[in-house]
Amino acid sequence: MDEIVKGLIKDENVLVAAVNCTDTVEMSRKIHDTWPTATAAMGRVIAGALLLASTLKEKQKVMIQVKGDGPLQETVAESDWLFNVRSYVKRPHIYMGLKDEKIDVGRAVGKGFLNVIRDLGLREFYQSSVALQTGEIATDLAYYLNVSEQIPSAVSLGVYIDEDNSVKAAGGFMIQTMPQTKSEIIDFLERKLQRCHSSSSMILQGLDPLQMLEEATGLPIEILQRSKVVYNCPCSKDRVIRAVITLGKYEIEEMIREGKTIQIECYFCKKKYELTVDELKSILRDI
């Protein structure tokens, strides 16, 4: 079972979170029919979105969007406060080979921006962006947290893909210090993280998220939250209709003039919805 753990280093002002999302990333791979490099990028963005979701309050959502000039073009993952997550990659059939015995995600992403969009339950979304530093996702997410949200953070994200292209390990961890964190603890964590195994290696060894945090920090963890992670897309025909309404009267009239049933596919789950000409006419009358 995929799960996420959020906690504090015991007796210290350091917030930590770790996630095993192997089954979730494998499900996303099957939905989008991704090749290894696309799978690795999408899996890292999924893990990153789940880690950011550990900081959300009730009824809030967060989305990570990685847009670069590399062949992947765009990779997106969205998670809510209950760790329902969904994702997509614009060009799923990408494999760029290995670099230093790891899948070369950075070259596939290229230069561009990492965007974080937070739905805090207000009238408008909160969005901020940073330029991609490496395209490897984890470094870029840590850079975003340090620069844009001014939260000193370390992030590790990893995806291990087997020879049959299936996902055998996916997850990550995040460590965030606070203004009250003692300098000797920060120095200790920096030294410890330099010798730390990758997230995917820990998962392949059978470590659960709590054990991953204990391995990464070398310190006992006080659990604040332990939750299940699931791939879940809340799309529906009503949502599709609302999206069509935003196109405006002219576009809907054009669809009606064509006289054909239109088919709309959800980016995230690939579910298809149909709207007949009569349904389009009804939508037009309503607006």
Image (cartoon, rainbow, N blue to C red):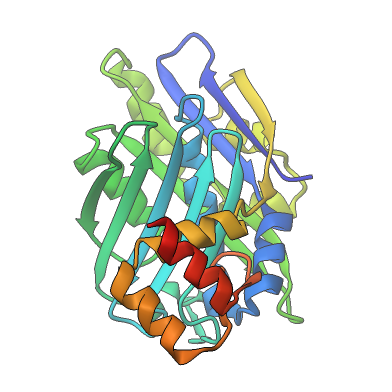
- Left or right, 110 with reference to 271: left
Can you say whether 97 is above or below 221 in the image? Answer: below
Q: How many numbered badges does the structure rendering display? A: 0
The residue at the far top in this view is: 11
- Left or right, 101 with reference to 108: right
Quarter of the image where the C terminus is located: bottom left
- Left or right, 94 with reference to 154: right
Can you say whether 238 is above or below 191 in the image? Answer: below
For the point 45% across and 30% down, the residue is 55
Can you say whether 71 is above or below 221 in the image? Answer: below
For the point 27% across and 47% down, the residue is 144
Residue 192 visible somewhere in the drawing: no
Where residue 114 sits: x, y (%)? 30, 59
Q: Nearer the viewer, residue 19 or 77?
A: 77
Residue 272 visible somewhere in the drawing: yes
Where residue 93 sits: x, y (%)? 55, 87
Where residue 62 sits: x, y (%)? 43, 43
Where residue 38 sits: x, y (%)? 53, 76
Q: Nearer the viewer, residue 126 or 66?
A: 126
Quadrant of residue 71 within the rendered picture = bottom left
Can you say whether 5 is above or below 44 in the image? Answer: above
For the point 33% across and 31% down, the residue is 122
Q: Nearer the viewer, residue 168 or 230?
A: 230
Quarter of the image where the N terminus is located: top right
The residue at the far front in this view is: 285
For the point 47% across and 63% down, the residue is 283
